Amino acid sequence: MNNATLIGLFAGLGLVALAIALGGDASAFLNVRAFLIVFGGTVAVTLISFRASEVLDALRAAGRTLAGTPTNTRVSIEKLIHLAESSRKDGVHTVERRMKDFRSNPFLMRALSLVVDGAAPEDIERLLNTERTAAQDRATKSSAVLRRAAEIAPAMGLIGTLVGLVQMLSVLDDPAQIGPAMAVALITTFYGAILGNMILAPLAAKLDRLTQERNVHLAVYSASAAAISRKENPRHLQSLVNAMLPPSEQVNVFS
C-alpha cells in the first residue's frame, strides 16, 4: 500500500470530520442536493473536457496511486548487473535461464526477451524507449484529467452556492425554507473545496511524481538490456545506471 498517500488523505479528511463533530451536529454537513451538484457536476464537466476512456484511465491511475505497491527497483537493477556479468561470460542462454527472476516486471521481461531473440542493441533501446514514452504520455494524460477535475470541483461548489442563494431569495416569505436553501449554498462550496483541494489536486501531484520516477526506472531498464546485448563491462553498466538514478536508489554491486 502507498502508506504516505493514504495517511495524508485520511488524516486530512479525519481532521476536518473531527472539527465538524466537535462543533455540534455533523448531520448538518450532509446534503444530497449539494452532493449531486458538486460530485455529479464535476464528473459531467470532466467528461465534456475528456473522452470517457481517458476519465476511466485517470480513475484507475488514481486507484493505483492510492493502493499501488512500490516495486523494489534497486533489487531488480542489482540482478540486472549480475546478469550482465554472467551473460558476458556464459552467453545469452544465461539471460533466458534467469528471466524467471524478473517475471513480476513485465517491462523487464519484454526487454530481456528482445535480448534472447538476438535483437540489435540499438533496436532494443528504440523499441523500449518508444514503450517508455507511450507509458509516460498515458500517465501524464491521467494526471491532466485529475488536475482539470480539481479545478472544476470548486467551480461546481460556486454554482451550487448560487443555486442555493437564488432558492433562498425566492422563499424569503417562508422562514422554514430559508435554512435548507442556505445550507445548499454553503455546503456546496465546502464539498467543492474538499474534493478539489484535499483529494483530486494532491492525487494529481502524486501521480506526476510517480510517473517521473517510473520513467527513470524504465530508462534504466532499457539501457541495461541494451548493455547486456552489447556484452558491456558490468562495471560500466553500474556506472551508467547510477548516473541515471537518484542517490537513494544507486547500487554498489562492484565497490
Image (cartoon, rainbow, N blue to C red):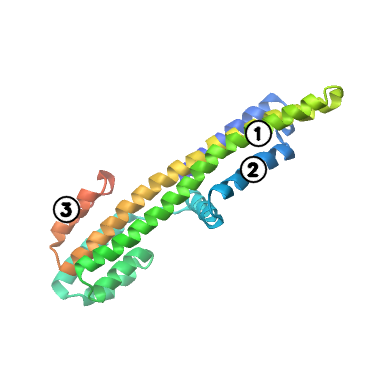
Q: Is residue 21 left or right of residue 94?
A: right
Q: Type of residue at label 3? A: Ser
Q: Which residue is mark 1?
A: 159
Q: Is residue 11 visible?
A: no
User: Mark 3 and mark 1 in contact (Cβ < 8 Å)?
Assistant: no
The residue wearing badge 2 is 41
Label placed on residue 31: none
Q: Amino acid at mark 1?
A: Ile
Task: Judge left or right: residue 197 versus residue 85.
Answer: right
- Give the residue type that dot 2 points to: Gly
At horizontal 16% and vertical 53% (from top left) the residue drawn is 239
Towards the viewer: 29 or 3: 29
Query: Residue placed at 23% from the left, 73% from the top?
Result: 119
Say above or below: 97 vs 107: below
Residue located beneath label 3 in the image: 239
Asked if the residue at tag 2 contacts the one at tag 3, i.e. Cβ–Cβ closer than 8 Å, the answer is no
Q: Nearer the viewer, residue 150 or 101?
A: 150
**Secondary structure category for the residue under label 1:** helix
Q: In x, y percent, where is residue 52?
A: 56, 55
